[in-house]
Image: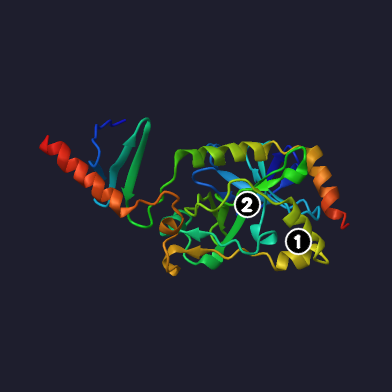
């Protein structure tokens, strides 16, 4: 992994069109500004972790909970 | 071909029904080939079953069934990642989690499974829209949707999820939904700070 040191207000350019600026440093928090073409996807990493976690839980849907749900949904009351 | 599955036993699958996920499913990158099983149990829940691993099967549903105002927006790069030229060639599914208390079931609206039905290429696409939830609870919505239609065929007819691409949109979903959009004044301050630190 490439590690760079930046001061407040300094930035990093990635390719020709992506720019990441250190906007604010407050204690342990760093705010970053990201300038990128609008088709670039930008997510906090937690989003990916949450999706992976949801996929793992999806696999764990048990036959018991499924059959309970099936009965429930087929009961129109 | 014959495929062994944990939930449905041995199934016979046509080669042309196999959907290729070049990047797998998030967290399950090693599984590339899936097909869709419809157990016909009147729940409208389908299963994305791996062809090579019997116990890898994700329950999923077409989100339009329970959420008629769901409009996923694909980036041009999303479109090309599944060779999609026309949005009408895509089908959209949400992976479900169904816990022991199934009334807490949820659908992943943030990262739908999008399948190019012409070429049978699929991908779990993470949408930029930050309003979309990874765990959208939807038991009540599903129950209502199912009880308000006479037959499952009626329901299926109404449930294609329209997708949009960024190019058809006037607004940039990223700008509209980014929770921490940067205030231009802060950038100015940052520039000032930079100038100061350089002069020191």
Q: Residue at x 58, y 65 (%)?
A: B162
Q: Which mark is residue B94?
A: 2
Residue A16 position (above or below residue B8): below
Chain that bears disc 1: B
Instruction: Give x and y (percent) for residue B153.
Output: 77, 65
Q: Is residue B36 left or right of residue B143?
A: left
Whether labels 1 and 2 belong to a single chain: the reply is yes
Colouring rule applied to residues: rainbow
Q: Which residue is mark 1?
A: B145
Visible residue check, residue B31: no
| Helix, strand or loop for disc 2 | strand
Q: Residue at x 75, y 41 (%)?
A: B10
Q: Residue at x 27, y 47 (%)?
A: A19
Residue B68: image tag: none
Which mark's residue is nearer the viewer, 1 or 2?
A: 1
Q: Is residue B95 rendered to the left or right of residue A25?
A: right
Image position, residue B46 (x, y; %)? 70, 51
Instruction: Pinpoint the chain carrying mark 2.
Output: B
Q: Nearer the viewer, residue B135 or B26?
A: B135
> Observer-nearest residue: B139 or B52?
B139
Q: Up-down: is A39 above or below A14?
A: below
Residue B149, given in percent of the width and then of the height, sits at 80, 66
Q: Determine crowd level at label 2: few under 14, some 14-19, many 20+ residues with C-alpha closer than 10 A.
A: many
Q: Position of residue B98 (x, y in %)?
A: 72, 42
1 or 2: tag closer to the N-terminus: 2
> Can see residue A1?
yes
Q: Quadrant of the C terminus of chain B?
A: top left
Query: Disc 1, disc 2: CB below 8 Å?
Result: no
Residue at screen point 59% across, 52% down: B109
* Measured Cα–Cα span from mark 1 to mark 2: 16 Å
How many neighbours does mark 1 have within 10 angstroms: few (below 14), some (14-19), or many (20 or more)?
some
Residue placed most toward the observer, A62 or B20:
A62
């Amino acid at each position: 992994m490439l590690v760079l040191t930046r001061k407040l207000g300094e930035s990093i350019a990635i390719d020709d069109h992506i720019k990441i600026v250190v906007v604010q440093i407050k204690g342990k928090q760093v705010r970053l500004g990201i300038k990128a073409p609008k088709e670039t996807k930008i997510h906090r990493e937690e989003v990916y972790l949450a999706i992976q976690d949801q996929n793992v839980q999806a696999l764990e849907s048990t036959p018991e909970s499924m059959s309970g749900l099936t009965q429930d949904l087929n009961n129109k009351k | 071909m014959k495929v062994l599955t944990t939930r449905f036993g041995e199934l016979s699958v046509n080669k042309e029904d196999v959907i290729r996920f070049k990047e797998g499913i998030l967290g399950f990158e090693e599984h590339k080939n899936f097909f869709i099983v419809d157990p016909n149990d009147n729940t409208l829940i389908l299963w994305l079953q791996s062809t090579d691993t019997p116990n890898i099967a994700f329950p999923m549903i077409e989100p339009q069934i329970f959420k008629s105002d769901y409009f996923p927006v694909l980036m041009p790069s999303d479109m090309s990642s599944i060779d999609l030229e026309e949005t009408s060639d895509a089908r959209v599914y949400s992976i479900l989690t169904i816990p022991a208390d199934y009334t807490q079931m949820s659908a992943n609206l943030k990262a739908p499974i999008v399948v190019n039905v012409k070429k049978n290429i699929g991908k779990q696409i993470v949408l930029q829209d930050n309003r979309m939830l990874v765990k959208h609870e939807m038991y009540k919505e599903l129950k209502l949707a199912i009880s308000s239609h006479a037959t499952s065929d009626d329901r299926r007819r109404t449930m294609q999820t329209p997708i949009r691409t960024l190019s058809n949109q006037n607004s940039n979903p990223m700008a509209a939904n980014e929770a921490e959009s940067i205030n231009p004044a802060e950038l100015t301050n940052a520039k000032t700070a930079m100038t100061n630190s350089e002069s020191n």
